[in-house]
Image (spheres, grey):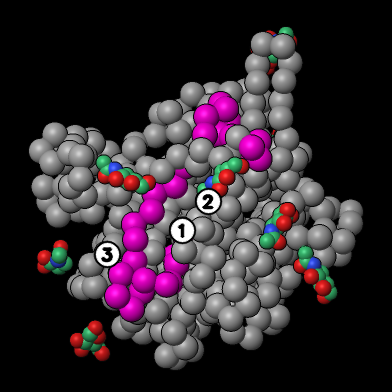
Amino acid sequence: MMNVNAVLVAITLALLTCAPRCVYSDDQRLLVNMTLVRNASALGAFCLDGSLPAYHLHRGFGGGARNWLLQFEGGGWCNSIKSCLDRANTRRGSTRYMSKWEVFSGILSNNASLNPDFYNWNRVKLRYCDGASFAGDAVYKNGTSLLYFRGQKIWEAIMLDLLPKGLGQARKALLSGSSAGGLSSFLHCNNFTKYLPSTASVKCLSDAGFFLDKRDISSNHTMRSFVKDVVSLHGVEKNLDENCTASSLNFPELCFFPQYAMKFITPPFFILNSAYDVYQFHHILVPPSADPQGHWNRCKLNPAACNPQQLNTLQEFRRDMIVAMGLSYKYSRRGGFFINSCFAHGQSESQDTWFAADSPRVHNRTIAEAVGDWYFCRRATKEIDCPYPCRSTTCHNLIP
Ligand SMILES: *[C@@H]1O[C@H](CO)[C@@H](O)[C@H](O)[C@H]1NC(C)=O
Ligand SMILES: *[C@@H]1O[C@H](CO)[C@@H](O)[C@H](O)[C@H]1NC(C)=O
Ligand SMILES: *[C@@H]1O[C@H](CO)[C@@H](O)[C@H](O)[C@H]1NC(C)=O
Ligand SMILES: *[C@@H]1O[C@H](CO)[C@@H](O)[C@H](O)[C@H]1NC(C)=O
Ligand SMILES: *[C@@H]1O[C@H](CO)[C@@H](O)[C@H](O)[C@H]1NC(C)=O
Ligand SMILES: *[C@@H]1O[C@H](CO)[C@@H](O)[C@H](O)[C@H]1NC(C)=O
Ligand SMILES: *[C@@H]1O[C@H](CO)[C@@H](O)[C@H](O)[C@H]1NC(C)=O
Ligand SMILES: *[C@@H]1O[C@H](CO)[C@@H](O)[C@H](O)[C@H]1NC(C)=O
């Protein structure tokens, strides 16, 4: 994990030493400034606290000048008035508290030797401040408290802002995102194509967004009930794919889960996920409520410390994920996937995992190569790594 203080120091230094135009920190990291979406208020598109939504745009050049990569920021969800009120006072719920400069690395890098296929595209990071993967549309008011659940409107406002900046004439486009933003990629992939010219090549990618509808180790539907709360609090249901919700009338909120929504997605889709996704391990499979005694604490922090029974549980999780994906993929002709066995959560935005000499590989391909091969149809990419601990040498096992 990147050290937050180090980033702040780097950013502060950059601002002190070369403001206002310089976009490199002293250690050569690309920093990109924030653009507030001024017109968002006309659509009622606000962050939780009522602040304006924002994105960071770094222009493409050369052969990439008419290609666009949009990356949804991640950062969990809020599922109650209380947790959303708390969130509204942080960088996860308000652009007021966000860093105004973002480091663009990994899939967002502008350096060909760090990001071989997308470095010269227009690259946009969509800031996450609604708490429901850019999919809600509701408002909460009770006289003293006011909360905007307007993720869907934020998505639309950012699209309308970017279209006249060149997105409307895109030749190639990739809608991407990590974690809760990887889920947004599933939820908005069909809608994305409708904004773009019919001649454009449009594809979508989800990094660490394949959140599984699975019971925890005490057989409770912890994740499913969390999702139900998010969907109903934020008014998400009406924005879910209508063909999906129509096909699961008794449980329309389940269409928030990629495993059910996937087969209704038309553009080619790439799933990048770890089979032992650390967030899912810690919050879906073994949430604290399911392990009050803390039997899993050591295993959660270090896979080498898991006992055989715990490893079995993890292998079963991996199998369930592959089955859920495989079922979705029956419906997808041009899709791709890269399911590795690293203990990680989010692998596209960090340079170490995206493309580096020692970054994770499956069949000797890095994530950047696998995604590029799929996007540009250089070769089919359907990679599933062998179960942990085999070939773990290319893993960094980044556990928070
Ligand atoms: C920040 O980005 C805007 C585009 O939104 C650009 O016009 C402006 O020059 C940038 N400001 C600085 C200080 O680089
Ligand atoms: C691009 O990355 C390479 C490898 O890290 C580095 O040597 C080079 O200086 C970078 N180029 C620029 C323009 O930052
Ligand atoms: C409004 O909701 C907040 C958060 O639940 C609560 O603290 C506050 O007392 C409520 N105000 C009124 C007038 O009900
Ligand atoms: C913002 O809204 C104004 C008035 O509705 C419109 O003229 C302008 O083109 C809009 N700008 C963008 C960037 O959408
Ligand atoms: C995207 O979805 C929203 C919500 O359903 C809809 O209002 C909007 O028209 C869609 N955009 C396009 C270009 O179809
Ligand atoms: C999980 O299920 C058990 C019974 O299996 C129940 O006692 C417990 O309250 C549940 N925990 C949560 C957090 O729902
Ligand atoms: C639902 O399916 C119909 C028929 O296949 C299709 O025309 C329509 O665009 C789909 N709706 C959505 C929201 O994808
Ligand atoms: C793996 O790929 C690298 C280049 O990315 C190459 O140098 C190396 O020889 C390959 N290793 C194997 C075992 O194929």
Q: CA distance from mark 2 to mark 3?
A: 22 Å
Q: Is mark 2 within 8 Å of ligand 4?
A: yes
Mark 1 sits on what residue? 165
Secondary structure at numbered mark 1: helix
The region drawn magenta spans 42-70
Please report the residue visible at 34 percent of the width from the left and 38 percent of the height from the top: 100
Tag 3 near tag 1, CB within 8 Å: no
Q: CA distance from mark 3 to mark 1?
A: 19 Å
Mark 3 sits on what residue? 110
**Closer to us: mark 3 or mark 1?**
1
Q: Name the image quarter holding residue 47.
A: top right
The quarter of the rendering in which ligand 8 is drawn is bottom left
Q: Name the image quarter holding residue 64.
A: bottom left
Crowd band around label 3 with a 10 angstrom C-alpha radius: few (<14), some (14–19), many (20+): many
* Residue 317 seen anywhere in this rendered image of the structure: no
Q: Is mark 1 within 8 Å of ligand 4?
A: yes
Specify whether 13 is left or right of 353. Answer: left
Specify whether 53 is left or right of 80. Answer: left
Q: CA distance from mark 2 to mark 1?
A: 7 Å
Crowd band around label 1 with a 10 angstrom C-alpha radius: few (<14), some (14–19), many (20+): few
Q: Is residue 190 above or below residue 15?
A: below
* Kind of residue sitting beneath label 2: Asp
Q: Position of residue 200 (x, y in %)?
A: 55, 78
Tag 2 near tag 1, CB within 8 Å: yes
Please report the residue visible at 30 percent of the width from the left and 49 percent of the height from the top: 32
Q: Nearer the viewer, residue 92 or 42?
A: 42
Q: Position of residue 241 (x, y in %)?
A: 76, 60
For marks 2 and 3, the one nearer the N-term is 3
Please report the residue visible at 46 percent of the width from the left and 58 percent of the height from the top: 165
Mark 2 sits on what residue? 161
Secondary structure at numbered mark 3: loop
